[in-house]
Image: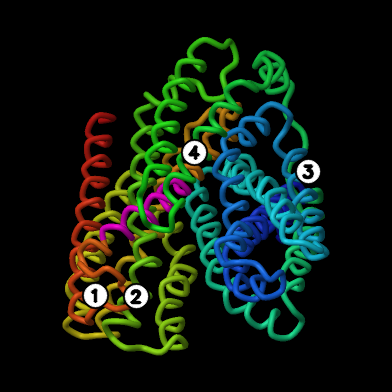
């Protein structure tokens, strides 16, 4: 007797696959847009007859808006509906990309990039939140791994694709590609992402109160001040950096005070005491700080200590994103099979080994040692990311998924910003030369060794947080 498949099950499976494909495209696009613009900075400097610090705002404006608003747009998605906001964010991103491609002046290009960053903040904040609505719980790890893979592909593809497009069609083409991909992602989101909510959820939504505008403004100003404190002065910490950092600390205190007073806060203070979320945010920030060190320190070591050409430096640096793309889905499946809590610790342990290898092997075996160390570090990072995101989102109330997803993305961004400043400064201090470009190869190798020894220590701290959290929950 031939069994006939239930058409409702087949339809649900197709819908889940389509939804995951649209989320993957949104994740790819947000990471691609971050990396593709970096390669255009020299060309933009010439095209607009502007200084390099001026054209850097093409990248900085995008990152600042994402960092400042990502939690707020996640909360807004919880209030107005995540599908509606995702489609609107993709539409804004596409329109801003087109405006950037047509911008006649540098200031207008920077404004367009800021608007593009707002659209990207929506995409980044809601993508992880949608996993809980579109994917069965037993496949959450696989979905998180796939999103990590798409993020790695976007990061790796950006410089090479941007270089080809600029050489062939000019700098405007990189933003036209963003616009076209954004429209495609918007149409996919409208078609596949779940639109409706149950009556119970609609009733809960009506009881959640208004959007916290005061908290949004305070948090945005605080995060913008911190991001500028970490990036202003291009690695030299001066009086302005100290003032901005002080403003960020004051703003954080004011934000927490205000959130405890309003009826419908942007971020409930209780979330910071959650036994799963609070440690996960801290671990995410520490791990991102370490991963940023590979992007900041790696190029100097490969070029100055090993004497590689620019082309070879780029090829070696691409190993990390390529390995990350290859192992993301596998990491997610491992999480589904063995459990998120255990795999958080396993991923961090592998990262400790990778950081230790980066501290020792490159000086002994050159490029082969560097590549081997990266091949240990990157899978550990992907395993950690898939497990950490799965652990956080597994038991979060559906009314809080957007804001919690935004907080996860924010902790990662803050770690990247901090890593660029702090790990870069540590490397420069360890090298001991006034200008790294003039330092001896032995000094650069010594700086590499010290930086990743400290990085290993940071991951050990993260692993201690994970073990303590597991023990408390048991």
Magenta range is 412-426
Q: Which residue is under mark 1? A: 444
Neighbours of disc 1 within 10 Å: few (<14), some (14-19), many (20+): many
Q: The N terminus is located in which quarter?
A: bottom right
**Residue 108 visible in the snapshot:** yes
Q: CA distance from mark 2 to mark 3?
A: 41 Å
Q: CA distance from mark 4 to mark 2?
A: 28 Å
Looking at the image, which is closer to me, 49 or 441?
49
Looking at the image, which is closer to me, 470 or 97?
97
Which residue lies at the image location 43% right of the left edge and 20% below the top edge?
270
**Residue 336 visible in the snapshot:** no
Query: Are circles 4 and 2 on residues that touch, CB within 8 Å?
Result: no
Q: CA distance from mark 4 to mark 3?
A: 27 Å
* Spot occupied by residue 184 in the image (x, y as percentages of width and height): 79, 61
Left or right of 443 in this view: 323: right
Neighbours of disc 3 within 10 Å: few (<14), some (14-19), many (20+): some
Q: Which residue is under mark 2? A: 300
Q: Is tag 2's residue or tag 3's residue first in the polypeptide sequence?
A: 3
Give the numbered dot on residue 225. Answer: 4
Left or right of 392 in this view: 376: left
Query: Are circles 4 and 3 on residues that touch, CB within 8 Å?
Result: no
Give the numbered dot on residue 88. Answer: 3
């Amino acid at each position: 007797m031939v069994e006939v498949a239930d058409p409702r099950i087949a339809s649900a499976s197709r819908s889940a696959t389509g939804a995951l494909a649209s989320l993957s495209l949104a994740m790819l696009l947000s990471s691609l847009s971050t990396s593709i613009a970096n390669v255009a900075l020299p060309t933009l400097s010439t095209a607009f007859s502007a200084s390099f610090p001026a054209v850097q705002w093409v990248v900085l404006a995008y990152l600042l808006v994402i960092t400042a608003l990502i939690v707020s747009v996640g909360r807004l998605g919880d209030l107005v509906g995540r599908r509606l906001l995702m489609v609107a964010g993709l539409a804004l991103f596409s329109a801003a990309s087109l405006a950037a491609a047509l911008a006649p002046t540098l200031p207008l290009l920077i404004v367009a990039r800021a608007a593009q960053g707002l659209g990207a903040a929506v995409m980044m904040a809601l993508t992880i939140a949608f996993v809980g609505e579109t994917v069965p719980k037993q496949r959450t790890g696989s979905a998180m791994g796939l999103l990590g893979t798409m993020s790695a592909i976007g990061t790796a593809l950006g410089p090479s694709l941007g270089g080809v497009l600029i050489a062939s069609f000019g700098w405007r083409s990189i933003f036209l590609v963003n616009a076209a991909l954004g429209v495609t992602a918007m149409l996919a989101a409208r078609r596949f992402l779940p639109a409706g909510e149950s009556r119970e959820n609609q009733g809960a939504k009506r009881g959640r109160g208004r959007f916290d505008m005061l908290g949004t403004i305070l948090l945005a100003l605080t995060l913008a001040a911190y991001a500028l404190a970490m990036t202003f002065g291009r690695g030299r910490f001066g009086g302005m950096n100290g003032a901005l950092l002080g403003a960020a600390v004051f703003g954080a205190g004011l934000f927490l005070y205000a959130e405890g007073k309003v009826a419908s806060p942007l971020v409930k203070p209780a979330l910071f005491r959650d036994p799963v979320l609070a440690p996960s945010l801290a671990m995410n920030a520490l791990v991102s700080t370490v991963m940023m060190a590979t992007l900041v320190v790696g190029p100097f070591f490969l070029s100055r200590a090993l004497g590689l050409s620019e082309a070879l430096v780029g090829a070696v640096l691409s190993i990390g994103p390529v390995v990350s793309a290859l192992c993301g889905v596998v990491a997610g499946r491992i999480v589904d099979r063995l459990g998120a809590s255990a795999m958080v610790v396993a991923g961090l342990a592998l990262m400790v080994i990778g950081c230790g290898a980066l501290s020792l092997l490159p000086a002994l075996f050159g490029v082969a040692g560097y590549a081997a160390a990266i091949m240990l570090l990157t899978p550990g990072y992907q395993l950690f990311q898939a497990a950490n995101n799965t652990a956080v989102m597994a038991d979060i109330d559906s009314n809080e998924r957007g804001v919690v997803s935004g907080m996860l993305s924010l902790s990662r961004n803050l770690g990247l910003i901090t890593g660029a400043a702090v790990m870069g400064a540590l490397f420069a201090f360890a090298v001991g030369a006034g200008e790294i470009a003039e330092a001896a190869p032995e000094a650069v190798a010594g700086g590499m060794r010290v930086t990743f020894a400290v990085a290993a220590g940071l991951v050990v701290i993260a692993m201690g947080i994970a073990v303590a959290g597991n023990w408390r929950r048991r």
